[in-house]
Each structure stands twice: as C-alpha cells, then as structure tokens.
Image (cartoon, rainbow, N blue to C red):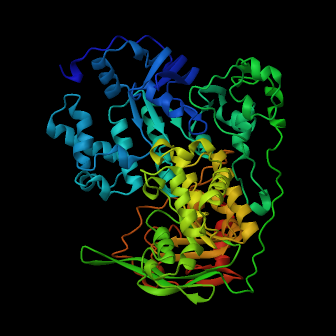
Amino acid sequence: MSVAEIELPEPVPTPHALELRDLDVVYRVRGRDRQVLRGVTLEVKRGEAYGLVGESGCGKSTAALAIVQYLPRNGRVRSGEIEIDGRDVLSLSRGQLRRLRSESVSMVYQNPGAALNPSLTIGRQVAEVFRIRGVGRSESLERAREALTRVQIADPGSVLARYPHQLSGGMQQRVIIAMALATDPALLILDEPTTGLDATVEAEVLDLVARLQAELQTSVLFISHNLGVIAKMCDRVGVLYAGRLVEEGATETVLRDPRHPYTVGLLRCIPRGGTRKDHGRLDTIPGFLPNLGEELPGCVFAPRCALVEEICRVEEPPLYDAGGSHVSRCHFHKRAQTLPRVLAADLALPVVDRSEAPLLAFDDLGKVFKQQGHDVHALVGASTAIWPGETLGLVGESGSGKTTLARALLGILEPTSGGVTLEGEALSPALRGRSAEELRALQIVFQNPDSALNRRHQVRRILRRSLKKLAGLTGRPAEQRLLELMQSVRLAERYVSARPGQLSGGLKQRVAIARAFAGDPRLVVCDEPTSALDVSVQAAILNLLVELQAERRVAYLFISHDLGVVRYLSDRIAVLYLGRLMELGPAEVVFDGPHHPYTEALLSAVPTIDGTERERIRLEGDIPSAASPPTGCVFHTRCPRKLGAICEEEEPPLAEVEPAHSMRCHIPIEELRRLQSDKKVARV
C-alpha cells in the first residue's frame, strides 16, 4: 500500500496547527532514562509564526524531532500529547505517520548541504516529494519546476539539472524550503534555517518564508538562537531552558519586557548598536546547563540565577501571569530585570598606535585559481595593514573572497601576486617556508570545527599537542595551562576526555578557539568563530578575545556575516566584493555612513531585536562569477545606485574619500551622504 493510500484518522476540530501538552521526552543513556523535555506545553495557531529560543542543549531541536517523530533510537516520548492539524501524532501507525509527514508537516534543517543527497540531481530530489504521493514522473518534474519558481529561483530548469554542490548555501536552502512547502503543509518547522547564511541571503530567505507563509497561511515553528531573526519573523515566542518552557508571550513583549532572569540574561549577551567602546564588556550567563537527566527539584535555572532564594531551590515555580498572554516560570518575575550583572561593564581597551610599524601588512595581494581551463580571480589587489592590538573586521557575502584573503595571509594558499610582511619582515608565501616562530605568531580559528578537529582524539590530546608544538609545554605545566584554556572559553572540565563527535557544534568551536591561543599568538584570524555559538557563549568568547587583546596586544582579522558582532569587536572594517576591497575605514564611520552602496545593502539586511522597520535594499541576483567579472565597477550589475555608462566601463580605484576612510565608487561621498541621509539605516 502506498503512502497516498493510507487513511488518516479524521482530524479533531481545532484552531491550532500544533499543540503540545505536558510533553516529556527522555533519552536512554547507559541503561537510564535521561529527561530532556519536562512538561512542555505550547500551541501554534493557524497562520501563526511561533519562535522557540534558548541555548544549545535546552531541548529545542529535540522538541522539533519529537513533533515529527524523528527522535533517535534511544529517544522516546515518555508522556504527554502531540497534535498536528487536529491529529494525535502519538496514536498514528507508521504508515499514517508517513502520510502525515508528507501532507501536513514539513521540516527545514539547519544545514541544507547535509539535508540534500549529494549523488542525486536537485530535480530528482524535489520531484520525489510528489512521486511518493502517487504523482507520475513527468508531472512530478513539472511540479518540481513550479516549486522552485515559487521560491523565486529565476532559472528553475538549470537548477533542476544541477547537483547540490553546484549551488550556493542560499540556493540550497531555497531548494529545501521548496521541498518543504511543496505539499502546502499545515505546519512548517524551521530549525536554525539561516545560521550559516550571510546577511543578504539570510534576509532573502526570511522574506521568502514570510511571503509564502502569508500566501499559503502556513503555521511556522521557528527555532533559532538569533533573537533578531525571531523578532522579525515571529508573532509569539517561547523561551526554553533545560527542557522547561520558562517564558512565553508576544514576541515584542518578551523582548522588550522580559520577565524571566534567563531571558534577561540572553538579551544582555547581545551586542547592540555600537562598538566595545560604547558597550564595554558584554554580560554573560554564569555556569553551564545542567547535565542531561540531572535531577532539578526546584527551578531549573536556580543554579545559574543571581536572584535565587531558598524557595527557588526547593519549589518549582508555576507559570505566573505577567500580564496579557505573557507568562513566566519565575517566583520573582516582577523583578527579573533587576538581575545584577555577572561581569562589570568596565573594559580595558588596547591602545592602537598607528604611528608605529604595523604588525602585519599585505600589498597588492591577489589569488588566481584555475577552474575548468578558466582563470578565477578570487582576490584582486588587496592592500592594507593591521597594527598590534587592533581588530580588522572583514565582511562581505559568501564568495566575496574573505576566506581566500585570510588563507593567503597565513600561507595556507600561496598568493599569485603581492606579498605579506610580519613586523616589517617578508613572509614566505607558502606555509612550509615559514619558521616555527612565524607559525606561532599567526593562528586561525576556522569556521567549521568538524573539519578542523581530529575526531579520533580526545580534547586533552588536541590541546596538549598544540601546547607542545606552539608553546613547548609538557607534563604538569601543560596540564595546568590546558585547564586554564578550557576555563577561559567556558568549556567544562568534564569534556577533557571527550572526543569532538561527542560535543555539540558550539562546544567543538570552543575547543578550536582554545587551541588557537595555546601558543600566545600575535595575530589570530577568526573565520566565523561564533557562527555556531549561542549568544551566551558568544558573549563569553567575545569578552575573551577583547581581554586577551588588551593583555597581550594580540591583533585579529575577524571574519563574520554577523554585522552586529563585527561592529562590536572591530576597530576598522574592510568590505570585500568579488575579491576587491570596496570600502575600508573606522568601524563607526563605515557603519554610520555614508557607506559604499554595497555596504549600505549589507546593513539594510540585518534584522534587529527591537523590530525596527527599515527599507531593505535588495540586491538582484547572486555575486557574478570571478571567472568572468563584469567590466567597469564589478558591483554595477547589482548596484541600486548605478550612475550609468561610467560604472559599466571604468573600474573605480580604492580612494580615500575622507580621513582614514577609503571607498571604491564613482559616486562622490557628498552625493552618497545626501542619498543615504533620507534612508538612514538603523544602527546595527
């Protein structure tokens, strides 16, 4: 019997697309049931977008997997109820459950590359959604084409013929969304769908989801640790901690007037609207999440809460009414916002003296790759310097050349042209030609810790090896330094014997950061080091970076698509597009404007926690191929402020438009100031 022929029980009339009632989920670990979700009750109304937030390990993804019954083999729903579109999920047979998944609920996962089969074309994978419902081969391919058109893929015929690796991350995510919405589900579950995407692609994906939700009246359960995304996308939000729903209400209300200390702590971890000079040290949430299955007799947050009293340790708080539909699981919800800071805001900042020689300089740096007989100019004539104690933020869309520049500086890639100097001495273009001292001076934290850490080695061995090779430490001094490193990146000592495969993405990244600092480097290239981290851990890492910088005058090249984090940490900003530096200047100048039109578009795409509405500048199309860049200004094919023939025919130089501020644009800076003053981008 095919999935299409399996009868589903008649739905019970309900105004809700999803209902969870007192849901308990356990994992069987070493012969014992370890509770992960604790009596979770929530509902997603029809046509509503509901956000679920909290740190990694709080149970967000477990809740999503329980809803669609995709829990791992050692996981099970111990008690409670799950209803989707009025149907009792836990009472369905396997066949009925498959039918429900194919018709009423769809899920979009965090990593689209892992969700797509690399050996099958996009067309075959999208068409399969329709084939399992009994649609014929030719009709399923036509419907697949329509599904891609619905998610605004301009050339669906070409995309259908490609394999996943031939698509950008943003395009892969659009395909996944097309597959998820192909059957017009009553409920769409989005589990961190934009975490790995840059600002412009993230904005496009979020706009797409919002448009399709309004068009199809689909309900959305949106899981994310990005509170700006939640503010933009969701009507209501629930805050999950250690498997407990600790606060719930209208998104605007919860983010503006949080009534649980945990929510207050999360919001304080986020850098908002300024640099570290404005904010000082970011606040953090002390301690760690409880161990899986740990008995918690009172409030689940009590061990980490600065407002804790004896009642919190012995009596679990109910959900108190905080006004309207706003509820909080805190005995002292009325004074939650009086939560004292964990860390003092005072922060010593390094002094950057640009009258002295720079630490690292690169001049006319270029990199050409050979690809199918074509020259691909991934980096073109990049020149600037980084001083001791300085952070240079590097931003731009995926494919703009950020990682190529970083790896050329480190010698991982040999530049095709130009050179790099360290403290005035020329560095060998290749890593193998550099001395041990030069290798120790320049370190990197990679974006993906899965590929950067040896999965077979324990954390102790990974860090001890770096301490030996970079710092010359062995024995007891190495062990003592190892524990200090782990503490500095908020990695609990219990993980010292763990292997990377036993750690979450955030924990793995902490190990990678600790390893980079094992040899007291002079400059660290941070390639998206916080993209996989929760806001609380991100705040601790950013504080760590700033404190180390102040103590040791270490410099950073900080690459990120999170422009709020880049603004907080950076002294200067470099904006890359198609391998060219388009803008370079002090952080406050670049972010406050006037900006290069490309920078302006990047900033307009960033969602804010306060939900500030602003006009988004949409860039049409993807970044052109570096194998055949446009003539003239390489940005003119997407630039909303293109002047005309001069932009198409003549490439502008990177010229100083005001003191210490350079830009590659034909439009005079005063004209940009006038154009952008009417559409001032909200502070990131």
Specify the quadrant that holds the C terminus.
bottom right
In this rendered view, identify the residue nearer to me: 340 or 376.
Answer: 340
Residue 628 in picture, x, y percent from top left: 34, 76
Residue 548 in picture, x, y percent from top left: 71, 64
Specify the quadrant that holds the N terminus.
top left
- Picture layout, residue 347 above or below residue 327: below
Residue 394 location, quadrant? bottom right
Residue 152 visible? The answer is no
Residue 423 in picture, x, y percent from top left: 63, 85
Residue located farthest toward the front when viewing the structure as drawn:
475
Q: Is residue 271 left or right of residue 150?
A: right
Q: Residue at x 45, y 76 (%)?
A: 634
- Picture layout, residue 142 above or below residue 513: above
In this rendered view, identify the residue nearer to me: 300 or 104.
Answer: 300
In this rendered view, identify the residue nearer to me: 236 or 465.
Answer: 465
In this rendered view, identify the residue nearer to me: 489 or 645.
Answer: 489
Q: Is residue 370 left or right of residue 240?
A: left
- Picture layout, residue 650 above or below residue 345: below
- Picture layout, residue 134 above or below residue 576: above
Query: Number of numbered discs present?
Result: 0
Q: Is residue 679 left or right of residue 630?
A: right
Residue 457 in picture, x, y percent from top left: 45, 51
Residue 556 visible? The answer is yes
Q: Residue at x 64, y 68 (%)?
A: 520
